[in-house]
Amino acid sequence: MEQGEMERPPLTLTATVLDAPDPRALAAFYRHLFGWPVVQDDPTWVTLRPPGGGPGLSFQLEERYERPTWPAQERRQQMQLHLDIEVEDLDQAVAHAEAAGAALAEFQPQEHVRVMLDPVGHPFCFFVNA
């Protein structure tokens, strides 16, 4: 450690949190998508965790939620983040996500990536690691 540098405290990423107008409904979508169980559930906060451990997804009530636009547009709510999800078969993953309530985004910037929109508009990407 260099002089004057503080020791880093232990940090553990536990979840990515997505705002939603209805946390339970959005959690139900991602539960169907990933098959992860709900580990915390109340009207304003729901958390899913993968069975084998690791960071999960949480969904937080935002009463003033505005659907993000994809791709970005001036003077419209911008996406703040997106999830990258590795898959073996893009077509199969897209069909599974659509059956759960997602939509394939109109704008697709890369050949081996599929940008999807969850039921409240959060973008997420399926990709094949070639």
Image: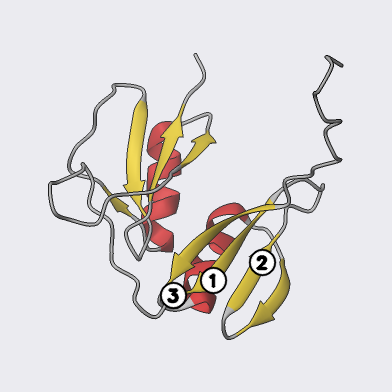
Q: Nearer the viewer, residue 89 or 65?
A: 65
Quadrant in which the N terminus appears: top right
Q: Is residue 28 visible?
A: no
Query: Upstream in the sequence, badge 1 or badge 2?
Result: 2
Three-letter code, disc 2? Thr
Whether pointer 1 and pointer 3 mark residues with C-beta atoms closer than 8 Å, the reply is: yes
Three-letter code, disc 1? Gln
Whether pointer 1 and pointer 2 mark residues with C-beta atoms closer than 8 Å, the reply is: no
Q: Is residue 5 visible?
A: yes
Q: Badge 3 is on which residue?
A: 62
Residue drawn where x is 47% and y is 31% of the image: 89
Please tell me whether residue 77 is drawn above or below residue 127 in the rendered image: below
Residue drawn where x is 19% and y is 38% of the image: 107
Q: Position of residue 57 (x, y in %)?
A: 62, 57
Query: Upstream in the sequence, badge 3 or badge 2?
Result: 2
Q: Categorize mark 1 by other alpha carbons within 10 Å: few (<14), some (14-19), many (20+).
A: many
